[in-house]
Image: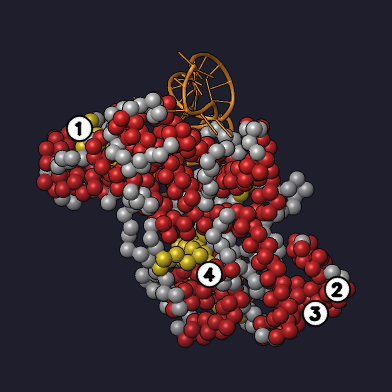
Amino acid sequence: MTISQLLNQRVQAALAAAGAPDAPAVIQPSGKPEFGDFQANGVMGAAKALKTNPRELAAKVVAALDLAGIADKVEIAGPGFINIHLAPEFLAQRLSAAQSDDALGIAKPAPQKVMVEYSSPNLAKEMHVGHLRSTIIGDAIARVLGFVGHDVQRCNHVGDWGTQFGMLVAYLVETRQSGDAELELADLENFYRKSKVRFDEDAVFADTARQYVVKLQGGDAEVLALWKQFVEVSMQHCQAVYDKLGVGLDLAAVRGESAYNDDLPVVVSDLRNAGLLVEDQGAQVVFLPEFKNPEGEPQAMIIQKKDGGFLYATTDLAAVRYRHRSLDLKRVVYVVDARQSLHFQQLFTLSRKAGFAPADMALEHVAFGTMMGEDGKPFKTRSGDTVKLVELLDEAIERAYTLVSQKNPDLAEDTRRSIAKAVGIGAVKYADLSKNRTSDYIFNWDTMLAFEGNTAPYLQYAYTRVQSVFRKVGAVNTSAAIVITEPAEKQLALQLAQFDEVIESVASTCQPHQLCAYLFNLAQQFSRFYEACPILSAEGAAKDSRLALAALTAKTLKTGLSLLGIAVLEEM
RNA sequence: GCGUCCAUAGCUCAGUUGGAUAGAGUGUCAGUUUCCGAAGCUGAAGGUCGCAGGUUCGAUUCCUGCUGGACGCGCCA
């Protein structure tokens, strides 16, 4: 149980004893230190409902409030706030659970089978910056859900099917006959562009391409083999990016659109049997009265085109169906661009109606905004091209290398190289994760790679400072008793003791920026503690206690950053 | 036309079922190192929370309207 939950329970009981059994306690961390550590704001609302004086009710609540061993001071302030000052011994005791546990003492909920669908690039092209946010955010969410004990399946719903693959296979055949296919495939972007040119210019080529699509979907062995070769090369490109980025995606997580090919006709017949499907203008569609089209009529969702082809809505429906019937998932999180939110609303609505997803299977669209350049427009190169993801990451590492070399030129070359990787990649990830995912965000090299402020390098630096202390002192008893006497010690302890609340919140809301804010706060509290409370020159129990606080800070920073997919360093 | 999201300090962003004097970071200015990494810490200045109403003890938060912006709305994904 988190501290908030504990206080909530106690205050609620006191409210009941004071005659307001149904009033919520409304526990929050206090806004300012003089208002205590936590505050209960529920009295005002309760007094209103009971039509009594809030200060009088607050007095009754405080009289009935049992916080023995938890708080050492409880005050009534303002119109009826209850300010709670936690007892240092209570905080110390809370931390002892975290000291001896790899999971930092968090309470684990009942494990759930959950899936996080993220990254999901189109294999027809190389990964570009548009795939960055989904990949980073989705990975952080998957890590957090796994950390709290859920059975997490990562799903890379890659785009490996559809009309463009006929064109690509046709071009692959050409290049194998007349050129160097291996060489051409090394640059997928170029490969796609060239095949598109052939498709647009040459009617015969275009015809061949269309035939390949039909053969592909029909299961023609020869075309399928060619398609497979292309997909494998493309996946290798992706894997290189994932490895560089340090995200937990591999071939095991891949289940692309093609995997549902055989299910698509079943989806159609299921919808028809459910009485949801109608034919309209030659296409098989479902009308959803919950949504309106520009004419104010029920929105149509096209399930099967008039030429018999399927669309991504059909594939997504098949995926929902599969994830329930075959995987029995209880929660599916789609980490996808906010621009597709209407699609997901329709998908979820229809999945319920068709019985593909039961009511107890949560379907969530975890939406995010667009990555913008410094001009506030979608991030592009100067010439207006999309930026390849691998090139962006290489630039981040290179910039970090330059910075590290400036700051710490005495370090060995290969040390600086490995620091640059952790700092560069960490900076890119943290800049993204630290912002509320729902809004667009502005990508800026200098801000994200700054060693000052709310950045990954600052957090990594805070960690190296702790490690530096340990190098000087030698062996540390990380489970030594924590004794809180100084204000800076208490503030640090208080912050450490709230790790579980943040994790719980991130797991339920899928908002990693809360964890970023927490870690930045923690690093700041540690710096203040470090400034105010000498560790190495302290003696006896005080020294052991401060070392234990430092050790727990390091553990929390390392764990928290690892949940964001960011590496820590011993020195930098 | 309908729908979704957004508008907070010069800049980048937080603000948790409505709570106290709206917070960080950055930038600017001023302090701080005989002492564990100053990539730090301390302080100051900086706001009509887009505008106008409404709900109430209390609104950045909820409701309505308006302005301004991003995105979406049938055979791409």
Residue appearing at x 70%, y 51% in the figure: A391
Q: Which residue position holds label 4? A: A299
Q: Chain of mark 3?
A: A
Decide which of A503, A103 is in the foreground and name it.
A103
Q: Tell me, yes or no, if residue A135 can be seen here.
A: yes
* Secondary structure under the numbered disc 3 in the rendered image: helix
Q: CA distance from mark 2 to mark 3?
A: 9 Å
Q: CA distance from mark 2 to mark 4?
A: 37 Å
Please name the amino acid that badge 2 sits on.
Asp
Decide which of A415, A60 is in the foreground and name it.
A415
* Secondary structure under the numbered disc 1 in the rendered image: strand
Point out the tag, 2 or 3, that comes first from the N-terminus.
2
Decide which of A301, A389 is in the foreground and name it.
A389
Mark 1 vs mark 4: in front: 1
Q: Which residue position holds label 3? A: A207
Q: Which residue position holds label 2? A: A202
Residue A73: give its label: 1
* Secondary structure under the numbered disc 4 in the rendered image: strand
Q: CA distance from mark 1 to mark 4?
A: 59 Å
Give the vertical position of A266 relative to A407 (above or below): below
- Local crowd size for mark 2, using a 10 Å CA cut-off: few (<14), some (14–19), many (≥20): few
Q: Chain of mark 1?
A: A
Q: Are marks 1 and 4 on the same chain?
A: yes
Residue A361 image position (x, y, % from top left): 39, 69
Mark 2 vs mark 1: in front: 1
- Point out the residue furthest to the front here: A474
Residue A29 image position (x, y, % from top left): 32, 39
Residue A58: give its label: none
Side (left or right) of A516 relative to A502: right
Residue A33 appears in which quarter of the rendering? top left
